Amino acid sequence: MKSSWDAGLYESDHAFVWKYGAELLPLLNPQPGERVLDLGCGTGQLTAEIAAAGAETLGIDSSPDMIGQARQNYPKLKFQLADARSFEVAEPFDAVFSNAALHWIPEARPVVRAIHRALKPGGRLVAEFGGKGNTGQVMTALEQAGSPDPLSTFYYPSIGEYATLLESEGFEVRFATLFDRPTELEDPLRGLEQWLRMFQKKALAGLPDSAIRKIEDRLRPTLFYDGKWHVDYRRLRIIAIKLYI
C-alpha cells in the first residue's frame, strides 16, 4: 500500500510530528551495535537520531516521497519502500521503533504480525501513535461538515484493545499509557486548514472548500487559543517484548 504525502510540506509545516517523537527515544534507548528498524520513518529525522547512538538502522515507509526525501536528507543511512502490513527482513532486529505511523493502518493485526517476524526473540517494540479519542473534536467537526466517516481510515485503539492484540500475537506488554497531548500548529492563521489538507485528505474528498471554513468556525471556540490553532491529539505509547516461546 503506497501512501501519497507531500514530503516538503511535512518537513516545513508539520515538523512537530517527529519533534514530539524524539521524546520516545529514551524509552527505545538504542545501544551501539544494535539493529533497529524504524517503521513509518517519514523523512528520516528520528532514524538518524537512532543511528547517531551507534545502532545500525533501517527506515521503512510506504510513501515514495517520504523515502525519497529521507534518502536525500541522510544519504549514508538505509531507507526502503515497504508496506507495514507485509514487510519482510533478511535478518531479525533487536528493536522496532515507530512514531506517529501505526494509526494510519486500520488493519492492525497484519502489522503486529510483521513486526513480530522482524524481531529477534526478546526483541522490543517501542511505539507511539494515535490512541482512543485522538482528534475527537476534529472528527466530529468533519462529520458535521459532511464527511461520511472520517474515522474509517484510522486506527485509534484503547490500551486494552492494543495490549490484547499484542499479547495474542506473541508479545508481552511491559509499558502502556494513553495521554492527552494538545498540539500547537505552526501557522497562527491557517494552521488548522494546513493540518486538514495534509492529514485529512480522504475525509475532505468530495467536500467543497467552504467545508474547511465551517470546520474552523465549529472548532475555534475550543481549539484556537493563545493566538494559535491546536489539535486535540491523544497518544498511545507502548513498549512490548517478543516472547521466546
Image: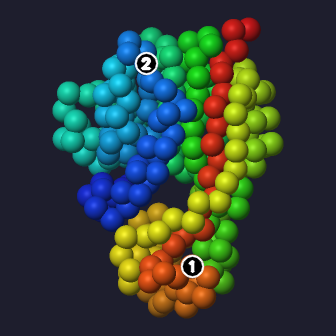
Give the answer, above or below, for where 124 lies relative to 101. above
**Disc 1 and disc 2 in contact, CB within 8 angstroms:** no
Query: Left or right: 241 with respect to 63?
Result: right
Q: Which residue is depicted at the point 70% across and 44% down? A: 177
Q: Nearer the viewer, residue 205 or 31?
A: 31
Q: Which residue is depicted at the point 44% across and 43% down? A: 22
Image quadrant in which you'd find residue 59: top left
Mark 1 or mark 2: name the one nearer the start of the chain. 2
**Which residue corresponds to mark 2?**
31
As drawn, the label of residue 81 is: none
Task: Find numbered disc 2 in the image and state the secondary structure of the residue it sits on.
Answer: loop
Can you say which quadrant of the picture contains the C terminus?
A: top right
Task: Find numbered disc 1 in the image and state the secondary structure of the residue it sits on.
Answer: helix
Q: What amino acid type is highlighted by mark number 1?
A: Leu
Give the answer, above or below, for where 81 lies relative to 219. above
Q: Nearer the viewer, residue 119 or 174?
A: 174
Image coordinates of residue 107 in percent, x first then y, are 64, 43
Q: How is the image coloured?
A: rainbow
Crowd band around label 2 with a 10 angstrom C-alpha radius: few (<14), some (14–19), many (20+): some
**Which residue corresponds to mark 1?**
223
Query: Which-is-in-front pick, marks 1 and 2?
Result: 2
Image coordinates of residue 65 in percent, x first then y, are 29, 49
Whether residue 103 is visible: yes
Q: Which residue is depicted at the point 77% across and 27% down? A: 167
Image coordinates of residue 79 in percent, x first then y, are 31, 31
Whether residue 1 is visible: no
Q: What amino acid type is highlighted by mark number 2?
A: Gln
Number of numbered labels in the structure image: 2
Image coordinates of residue 216 in percent, x first then y, are 52, 86
Question: Which residue reaches farthest top?
Answer: 245
Q: Which residue is depicted at the point 75% across and 36% down? A: 163
Give the answer, above or below, for where 149 lies relative to 59. below
